[in-house]
Amino acid sequence: MIELAPQNKIGLSLSNPIMIASGFCGYGDAYQKLFDISSFGAVVTQPITLRPQRGAIQPRLGETKAGFILNIGQQNPGVKKVISRFRKKWPRLGASVIAHLPADEPNDLMRTARALSGITSAQGHSVLVAVELGLPHQTTTQAVKDWLKAIQDGTELPILVKLPLSISRDISEVAVTNNADALVIGIPPLGTAISPMQGELVTGLQYGPALHSLALYDLQRHADFGIPLVATGGIHSLADAQILLDAGALAVQLDSLLFIDPKSAYEIAWNFS
Amino acid sequence: MSLLLRPDPDPGMAWLSARKEGDILDLIGPLGTGFVLPDNVVGNLLLVSDQQMIVPLLGQMERAMAVGFSVTLALESKRATTLYPVAALPPLVEFQAATLDGSRGYHGSIIDLLPDLLRWADMVCTVGSMELYRTLKRQVKEVRFGAYKGFLYGLVAENLMACGVGACLSCTIETEAGLKLRCVDGPVFDLETLQI
């Protein structure tokens, strides 16, 4: 078992170091018809906010060299609807479910975290195993402190902080000193592409295999932090995953591979299960 | 399996066009919601397109004929040589062609032939441009004295899709019930529910 939150009284044990990143499996069930989700150590949900978010206008997708730009703008039906639709589905997935909360107004974050950690099984355990806080590309140390405190006020579940790639060291440090349980490295950089159908520009997160070297570089940058690390970015093969695990990541998250070749993503997870 | 592909600058389509007999393709599907027929009802089915990608209509045509529908296929093309070959159609299908250069059938747009066809039809399935869909919606209101659900269905394929399974939320479309996903809720929609 892999322990991602050794300092947390609940802990976060995964049976498999291969996770699915936020934005790549809906609320956990998007690929159920194609493969067995329970082969993965964990699934991180789409963003969940207190209030419904309509998300970005179209176009939301643009193809780039060996990758794509995606901008959904945090579309989600709000925490109340997410809970009502998925509270019974989540325990049946067979994989641990981690809720992704994008940075938000602290009070809203606290209420969202509280609502999500209130979903319990018949045995009284939380259905969700952790919360992942997604940071914006531009932020301040004070904002990170406020967001972490807000989530900690709402839940005792372990908190993973997902950092943008190449984020400045002081942001990572403040996450650690404010009791983040693990760091996820990292959120892709921003890019712009032309959407071919309408010829419009779409700006969003740049995904693709080229991110692997950026993730590996950032993983090494955080090696001395003394906190569990999860790496994500450009994992398109078993070897890609193994390189990041060998470099110090306790777990990795698959993202763009799910869209490009879902069977290969499943095979990577199956190899570790 | 056969592939019917149009010339397309899209790199993915170019790759697909270059496949040879014997190549192995890794496919996932069937995805989403396609054309359906009403249960226990037969009538007149109108199939309309102003583009070359009419393959989804051919499947609907076969299913409809198998249960007893009368079918009319109305196609528009620039010229006769780019029209779907009528010899490949079942003999009982009524074929209405419109060519912009007048080389076959009606000289002009298929839109000009629609009013009479819409009066005849009990159900319409279409694959084409958003402009065609908007015209169809407007003409249905005019010739059938109102618009209603369950009559006009269209395949919406004008945006990229990344995942095909509802994970990425990149293929949203505005409907009367809010945002829906073309890959899961579509790509075929009751056009009366779309805000186009």
Image (spheres, coloured by chain):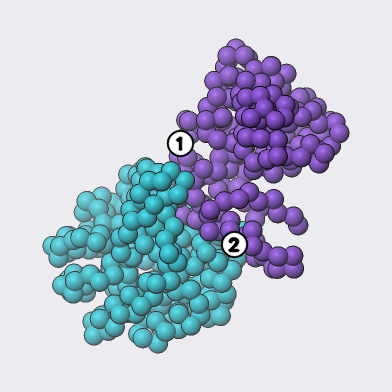
Q: Is residue B26 visible?
A: yes
- Image location (x, y in percent) of residue B178: 45, 36
Q: Amino acid at mark 1?
A: Glu
Q: Chain of mark 1?
A: B
Q: Nearer the viewer, residue B99 or B195?
A: B99
* Horizontal relation, residue B153 to residue B68: left or right: left
Q: Say which quadrant the C terminus of chain A sits in.
A: bottom right
Q: Could you tell me which secondary element the residue under label 2 belongs to?
A: helix
Q: Amino acid at mark 2?
A: Trp
Above or below: residue A39 compared with residue A196: below
Q: Quadrant of residue B82?
A: top right
- Image location (x, y in percent) of residue B189: 58, 36
Mark 1, Cα crowd under 10 Å, few <14 / some 14-19 / many 20+, is some
Q: Say which quadrant the N terminus of chain A sits in.
A: bottom left
Q: Which mark is residue B174?
A: 1
Mark 2, Cα crowd under 10 Å, few <14 / some 14-19 / many 20+, is few
Q: Chain of mark 2?
A: B
Instruction: Please give the name of the residue rendered at 52% of the width and 33% of the height, measured from the top-left corner.
Output: B130
Above or below: residue A273 compared with residue A147: below
